């Protein structure tokens, strides 16, 4: 099942050449371990199972996906359930069983990524920017990091397309859901490759399961967090701030940020929440906005890390203690930095009042 165009030598650096280089590297190995960032999101899961499909069907090698953290959002849990995505905990995996390691939707050295100490990474597929970490890619044999692509899943789908692999319905649906979430239904950070990837996947998709993943039932805790979030809004002109205080997960911070960007007055949303002693921050801007610049400015002087692309950014600040006073002070510092970055220093916020006010 060799596509005839493989007979021709592809142009160096072309999409075809990249896919072939990835295939050649995998063909020389026996067993692939696929890792991603902590608390994997749909794009990282889609990219991971997509790479596993590539390894199996293009290079003929078996693989395992191993994660750290949890699958948090109800949608993400539905994705794992509906598409029967198999994964282990990194701590349960016998690392010596593998002679090839891939990192998907993240890079070595990123704050939210825990690669077991001493484990060398051979493959990195990602679309995030974080220049402080670029030195960590020096010893990686295959690096495909493209920050102009909306989703890592698109990048992986591109490799399947170039290698002539027909993905299973489960893999195609996982990749499509990854693209859907990271690009907000192909509306944000979209590149030519995201569109081509979507077209390539479309005939293989399981649309029924895609809908089941997109609209899962939600636990009561979700509505409780939402109620708290809405009571804590600080509304500036074009800017929405929301600090959730203690919250169950970083995903919830991102989820509330996504929701608040739908407010018709919002040009930018900053949402934060404390999980353990880590204060997680999610920034969303209108399409064309530079969320990463804003999150960097807001976290100026704090001990933490951040990353982002286009109108979406996220980060975490490590606190020594997580008492109410420390949290309040941090919230104040962040708010001051954000207002300065937005050119709005000294203005006052409004809150959501009761309906009859
Ligand atoms: Mn991603």
Image (spheres, rainbow, N blue to C red):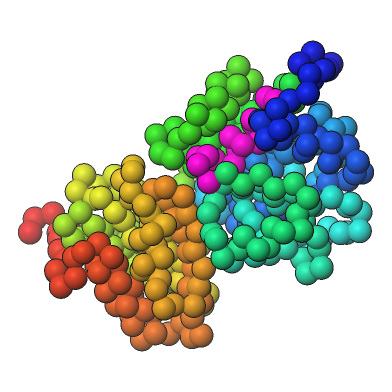
**Residue 123 in the image: above or below residue 11:** below
Percent across and percent down for residue 270 are 33, 60
Please identify the residue farthest to the top as the structure is shown: 4
Residue 167 is left or right of residue 340, and the answer is: right
Residue 80 is left or right of residue 99, and the answer is: left
Percent across and percent down for residue 247 are 44, 66
* Quadrant of the snapshot with the C terminus: bottom left
Residues rendered magenta in the picture: 147-162
Q: Toward the viewer: 228 or 11?
A: 11
Can you see residue 213? no
**Residue 136 in the image: above or below residue 60:** below
**Residue 282: within the magenta?**
no
**Residue 18 in the image: above or below residue 205:** below
**Residue 160: within the magenta?**
yes
Image point 54% across, 59% down: which residue?
130
Residue 354 is left or right of residue 1, and the answer is: left
Residue 50 occupies quadrant: top right
Image point 88% across, 52% down: which residue?
98
Percent across and percent down for residue 47 are 65, 41
**Residue 142 in the image: above or below residue 117:** above
Q: Toward the viewer: 304 or 72?
A: 304
Q: Main secondary structure of the magenta part?
A: helix
Residue 56 is left or right of residue 244, and the answer is: right
Percent across and percent down for residue 61 are 87, 37
Image point 86% across, 59% down: which residue?
95
How many tags in the picture? 0
Q: Toward the viewer: 160 or 87?
A: 160
Please identify the residue farthest to the left as the structure is shown: 357
Residue 334 occupies quadrant: bottom left
* Quadrant of the snapshot with the N terminus: top right
């Amino acid at each position: 099942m060799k596509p005839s165009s493989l007979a021709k030598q592809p142009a160096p650096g072309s999409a075809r050449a990249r896919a072939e280089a990835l295939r050649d590297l995998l063909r020389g190995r026996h067993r692939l371990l696929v890792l991603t960032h902590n608390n994997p999101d749909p794009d990282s899961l889609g990219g991971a199972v997509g790479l596993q499909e590539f390894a199996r069907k293009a290079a003929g090698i078996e693989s395992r996906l191993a994660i750290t953290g949890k699958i948090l959002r109800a949608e993400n849990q539905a994705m794992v359930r509906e598409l029967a995505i198999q994964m282990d905990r990194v701590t349960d995996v016998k690392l010596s069983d593998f002679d090839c390691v891939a990192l998907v939707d993240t890079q070595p050295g990123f704050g939210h990524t825990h690669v077991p100490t001493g484990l060398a990474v051979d493959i990195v597929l990602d679309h995030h920017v974080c220049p402080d970490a670029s030195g960590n890619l020096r010893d990686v044999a295959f690096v495909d990091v493209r920050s102009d692509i909306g989703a890592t899943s698109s990048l992986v789908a591109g490799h399947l397309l170039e290698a002539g692999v027909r993905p299973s319905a489960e893999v195609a649906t996982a990749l499509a859901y990854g693209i859907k979430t990271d690009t907000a239904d192909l509306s944000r950070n979209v590149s030519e490759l995201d569109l081509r990837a979507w077209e390539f996947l479309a005939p293989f998709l399981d649309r029924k399961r895609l809908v089941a993943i997109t609209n899962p039932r939600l636990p009561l805790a979700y509505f409780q967090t939402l109620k708290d979030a809405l009571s804590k809004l600080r509304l500036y002109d074009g800017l929405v701030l929301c600090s959730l205080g203690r919250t169950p997960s970083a995903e919830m911070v991102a989820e509330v940020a996504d929701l608040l960007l739908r407010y018709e007055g919002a040009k930018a949303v900053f949402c934060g929440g404390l999980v353990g002693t880590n204060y997680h921050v999610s920034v969303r801007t209108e399409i064309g906005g530079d969320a990463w610049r804003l999150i960097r400015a807001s976290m100026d002087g704090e001990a933490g890390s951040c990353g982002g692309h286009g109108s979406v950014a996220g980060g975490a600040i490590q606190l020594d203690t997580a008492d109410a006073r420390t949290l309040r002070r941090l919230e104040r510092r962040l708010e001051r930095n954000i207002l300065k970055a937005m050119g709005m220093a000294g203005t006052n916020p409004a809150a959501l009042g009761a309906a009859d006010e």
